[in-house]
């Protein structure tokens, strides 16, 4: 399981990196809506694989030895701490970003969808009112 998680963690880093670059470019051009969401989702998946890696190692069996070894300390403590801060900042940045405005094509599509479902809502409420008046209380 550790080897599989390591391979996936290694490959997903490239997806995270590409999504991060696309989100940064999109933030400067004002079109980072979907890429920012994809970026934070990829970060979360990367974090989960990192947790699997952390808990499938023996870093916590002898914490003193782990802290004396600079490479083991980096992966067991420092890397995880820095990445948690980075993930928190990415989520804060996405939450604090202004909402993207709907494009005219999407706005008209949304309006058309709303108009097409309006008769369904009216007919459903009429059926419900008729059923309640002719049968037992609703």
Image: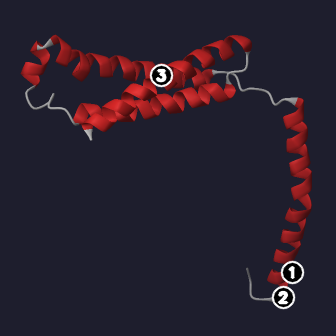
Residue at 59% in and 24% down:
94
In screen coordinates, is 39 left or right of 70?
right
Q: Is residue 31 visible?
A: yes
Look at mark 3 in the image and give the residue it sits on. 14
Residue at 81% in and 31% down:
102
Residue at 35% in and 31% down:
7
Which type of secondary structure does the marked residue at label 2 adopt? helix
Which type of secondary structure does the marked residue at label 1 adopt? helix
Q: Do residues under tags 1 and 2 come within 8 Å of each other at their CB atoms?
A: yes
Which type of secondary structure does the marked residue at label 3 adopt? helix
Which quarter of the figure is the C terminus placed in? bottom right
Q: Residues within 10 Å of mark 3 (few under 14, many from 20)?
A: few
N-terminal-most mark, 2 or 3: 3
Residue 18: x and y in percent read 55, 20
Mark whose residue sits in front, 2 or 3: 3
Look at mark 1 in the image and give the residue it sits on. 130
Q: Can you say whether 17 is above or below 2 in the image?
A: above
Look at mark 2 in the image and give the residue it sits on. 134
């Amino acid at each position: 399981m550790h080897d599989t998680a390591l391979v996936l963690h290694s490959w997903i880093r490239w997806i995270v990196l590409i999504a991060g670059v696309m989100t940064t470019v999109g933030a400067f051009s004002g079109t980072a809506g979907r890429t920012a969401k994809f970026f934070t989702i990829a970060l979360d998946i990367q974090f989960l694989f990192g947790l699997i890696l952390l808990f499938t190692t023996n870093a916590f069996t002898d914490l003193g030895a782990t802290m004396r070894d600079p490479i083991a300390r980096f992966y067991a403590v420092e890397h995880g701490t820095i990445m948690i801060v980075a993930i928190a900042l990415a989520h804060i940045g996405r939450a604090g970003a202004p909402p993207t405005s709907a494009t005219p094509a999407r706005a008209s599509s949304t309006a058309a969808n709303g108009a097409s479902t309006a008769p369904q809502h009216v007919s459903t409420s009429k059926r419900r009112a008729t059923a309640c008046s002719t049968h037992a209380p609703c």
